[in-house]
Image (tube, rainbow, N blue to C red):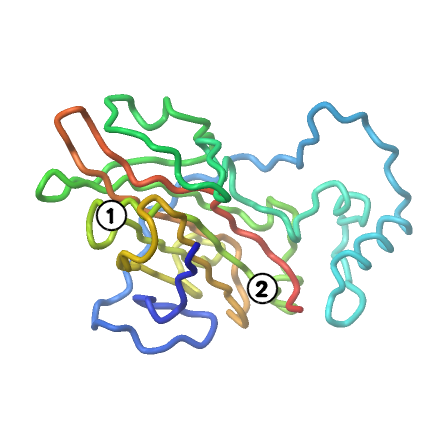
Amino acid sequence: MEEVSDRHALGGGGMETKEPASPQEPPSPPPPPSPPSPSTPENPGLPTLEQPSEAHARQLLLEEWRPPRGSLELPPGLTWKLLFLRRPLYRNLLRSPNPEGINIYEPAPPTGPTQQPLDTLGNFHGWYIKTEKLLHNLSWTVKQQCVNLLAEGLWEELLDDEQPDITVMDWYEDSRLDVCVYELHVWLLAADRHTVIAQHHVAPRTSRRGSPGCWIQVSHVFRQYGPGVRFVHFLHKTKNRREPGGLRRTRVTDSSVSVQFRE
């Protein structure tokens, strides 16, 4: 497995980055998809546990989260019991992060070209999917989500004053269908969902090290991004190639957006 570092970034914000390798301007965010309704973390098949008291929930979460100042002030209407239920920190806020059920600890399972639409190959709930056609029988599959941080249980004072880290991570298959088979674009947006407060863009090139089909990790941490962040727009692209038998795809898995305190 190989990790892509910030030296591949096309543009960024919210933390120190090196100068991009090319003068390409960072892309503007596309029209944001509507975030799905927030849902509480599910524990299928497990019995319902007794909820802790307000004081006990506060103690448990402070021990688990370890905020820099040792405590957190909650705004009116927000309780520790509700936070204990929602768990907005240290949780993947993306829907269906592994749509095809692929294990990154094993090589990408062999697959040939297929005629089946992508949305029939797994659970893509929460993703907005489109195709961008390119030359020479190539195309991009574009998948995106827009995460509403407040709807997920975070609150304005936390985001503006504490500015916890916002971490994005992804794993893509080294399919070698082209020199570049993957792109990641992330925007931190204000409440109007158009004003960009920070952004990160990466388009790694194939190194051709190791065996084809290995998984490559891409990650970025937004720090000290400034007040006003309310949405995270996550978009990744994976390269396809049209062959006589159908479409041969580059697969991606274990996508994540999470918020956590700096260690």
Mark 1 surroundings within 10 Å by alpha-carbon count, few (fewer than 14), some (14 through 19), many (20 or more): some
Residue 17 sits above or below residue 57 on the image: below
Residue 235 pos. (x, y %): 37, 48
Q: Residue at x 14, y 31 (%)?
A: 243
Q: Can you name the residue that lies furthest to the left here?
A: 136
Name the amino acid, label 1. Arg
Q: Are marks 1 and 2 in contact (CB under 8 Å)?
A: no
**In front here: 130 or 5?**
5
Q: Specify whether 43 is left or right of 31.
A: right
Q: Specify whether 227 is left or right of 171.
A: right
Please name which of the two marks, 1 or 2, marks the residue nearer to the observer: 1
Residue 170 sits above or below residue 117 on the image: below
The quadrant where residue 224 appears: bottom right
Provide the residue designation for mark 2: 165
Give me the disc on residue 59: none
Residue 174 pos. (x, y %): 32, 48
Residue 61 pos. (x, y %): 79, 54
Q: Residue at x 46, y 35 (%)?
A: 102
Quadrant in which the C terminus appears: bottom right
Earlier in the chain: of badge 1 and badge 2, it is 2
Provide the residue designation for mark 1: 176
Q: Secondary structure at mark 2?
A: strand
